[in-house]
Image (cartoon, grey):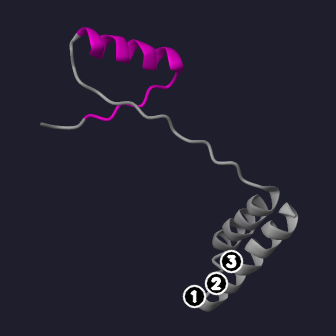
Amino acid sequence: METITITPQSKRQGNVIKAVLKEMKVNFTTSAEEEVEVSTAEMDAIRVGLEAADNNEFYTEEEANMIFHDAIYKVDKAGN
């Protein structure tokens, strides 16, 4: 048996697909994508990382860990 993944582009499409599968007596499961909320500090850290990558600026693992911990500290500080 094979698995088919379908990603509807609208709620209406999803409803139509589910109705067709039910009518055909095809077993299926659904799951909704979870939205993840990202804070301003997290977005800033992501932007800095993307800009660095665009400029071909890469870091050692140690440097990356320091940047990560600094970003987490900023997020924790912003949340308190």
Q: How many numbered circles are shown?
A: 3
Q: Is residue 30 magenta?
A: no
Residue type pointed to by label 2: Asn
Bin the neighbour count of mark 3 within 10 Å (Cα to Cα): few under 14, some 14-19, many 20 and up: few
Please tell me which residue is depicted at 64% across the width and 48% down the height of the picture. 36
Most distant residue in the left direction: 1
Please tell me which residue is depicted at 44% across the width and 20% down the height of the picture. 14
Residue 1: x %, y % from top left? 12, 36
Residue, disc 3: 68
Residue, disc 1: 61
Q: Is residue 14 magenta?
A: yes
- Out of 45 and 72, give the one closest to the viewer: 72
- CA distance separating discs 1 and 3: 10 Å
Q: Which residues are magenta?
A: 4-23
Residue 20: x %, y % from top left? 30, 11
Residue 65: x %, y % from top left? 64, 84
**Does the residue at mark 2 contact the one at mark 3 (Cβ under 8 Å)?**
yes
- CA distance separating discs 2 and 1: 6 Å
Please tell me which residue is depicted at 52% across the width and 21% down the height of the picture. 10
Magenta: main secondary structure equals helix
**Does the residue at mark 2 contact the one at mark 1 (Cβ under 8 Å)?**
yes
Describe the element under mark 2 as helix, strand or loop: helix
Describe the element under mark 3 as helix, strand or loop: helix
Residue type pointed to by label 1: Glu
Residue type pointed to by label 3: Phe
Against 54, is 24 above or below?
Answer: above
- CA distance separating discs 2 and 3: 5 Å
Q: Earlier in the sequence, mark 1 or mark 3?
A: 1
Against 74, is 1 above or below?
Answer: above
Residue, disc 2: 65
Quadrant housing residue 52? bottom right
Against 53, is 79 above or below?
Answer: above
